[in-house]
Image: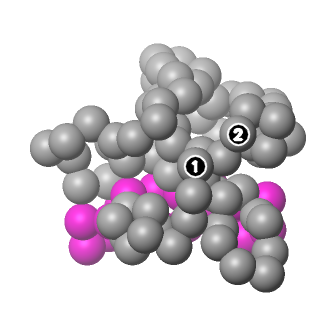
Amino acid sequence: MKKDMGKTKVVFQVWKGLHDDVIALFPEEEAEHGFCNSYEHVGQHGSADYSLVISRTRPATPAKYEALRQELESIGYDLEIRARRTYGKH
């Protein structure tokens, strides 16, 4: 759970293909091996290769990511939703 960490930049994406699951990428939160942190309903927190995930997903609409946004805020995130990462990070 996140507490008193300020705003967390997040990019919401939808996996291409058979399932339409939403993934939240935290491009400024470094995980192991230069990856960034991520979050999904199933599996929850994990690390992700930002560029690879972007290549295999499409931007999520607000209606599509709303449930995941609410879940993240319920565990303490204060989100700053972005369309893409800030370059120079991961």
The three-letter code of the residue at mark 2 reads: Thr
Q: Position of residue 60 (x, y in %)?
A: 66, 46
Q: Which mark is residue 16?
A: none
Do labels 1 and 2 touch, CB within 8 Å? yes
Q: Position of residue 7 (x, y in %)?
A: 48, 21
Which residue corresponds to mark 2?
Answer: 61
Residue depicted at 34% across the width and 65% down the height:
51
Q: Quadrant of residue 61?
A: top right
Is the residue marked by circle 1 packed among few (<14), some (14-19), or many (20+) residues within 10 Å?
some
What's the distance in space between the residues labelled 1 and 2, CA to CA?
7 Å
Residue depicted at 37% across the width and 47% down the height:
27
Q: Position of residue 33 (x, y in %)?
A: 25, 73
Residue 5 located within the stretch drawn in magenta: no
Q: Nearer the viewer, residue 5 or 64?
A: 64
**Horizontally, is 4 left or right of 35 in the view?**
right
**Horizontally, is 34 left or right of 55 in the view?**
left
Please identify the residue farthest to the bottom as the structure is shown: 18
Determine whether 11 is above or below 36 in the image.
Answer: above
Image quadrant holding the N terminus, namely: top right
